[in-house]
Amino acid sequence: MKKPTLNQQKSGPRADNTDGESAVLANIAEMPEPDRDMGERLHAIIKASAPALSPRLWYGMPAYAKDGKVVCFFQSAHKFNTRYSTLGFNDKANLDEGHMWPVAFALKELTATEEAKITALVKKSVR
């Protein structure tokens, strides 16, 4: 039997996470530019900002979990045929501010300004 490709492997909430880092990096490597560059940079930012988060695939997307629960994820523009990529945060992220706060951010490009904002958000999300 032929081994499934990364896009065919189980990647839902109960996926086997034994080598999440390799799976995430391989998934990002399969992305076309500019999503690949953005995914690589986000991966580095998230790993540096919140070492407690574990990389894993989540519904075929790079994601980062704490205690087995996904905190944030990256949706490539190419995968969903959209005009921008998305950095999203799940309800396990501690981003609460009052009665309403953003949980997803459109990304067209990563400059130093966006990288600083993402670093702060990721750090806040795991407090």
Image: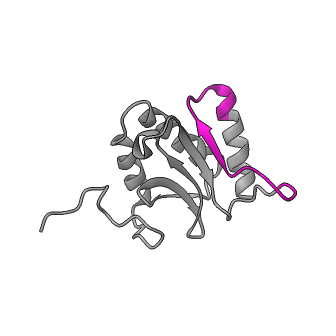
Give the tally of numbered discs. 0
35 sits left or right of 8 in the view: right
Estimate the x, y position of residue 100 in percent, counting from the top left.
81, 55
**Colour option used:** one colour
- Say which residue appears at 76% left-offset and 55% top-offset: 95
Q: Please identify the quadrant where the C terminus is shown.
A: bottom right
Q: Looking at this view, name the residue that lies furthest to the front.
A: 82
Quadrant in the picture for the N terminus: bottom left
Residue lying farthest left? Answer: 1
Note whether 66 is above or below 28 in the view shown.
Answer: below
**Farthest right residue?**
98
Instruction: Tell me where residue 34 appears, x and y as whole percent.
Output: 44, 30
- Please report the bounds of the magenta region as a residue range: 97-115
Residue 108 coordinates in the image, percent (x, y): 56, 31
- 69 falls in the magenta region: no
For this view, does 84 lie left or right of residue 126?
Answer: left
- Kindly identify the residue that appears in the image at 31 percent across and 63 percent down: 9
| 3 vs 35: above or below | below
Q: Is residue 106 magenta?
A: yes
Residue sitting nearer the eye, 52 or 83: 83
Picture coordinates of residue 116 (x, y %)?
Answer: 70, 34
Which of 72 and 68 lies nearest the eye of the viewer?
72
Picture quadrant of residue 69: bottom right
Q: Residue at x 40, y 47 (%)?
A: 25
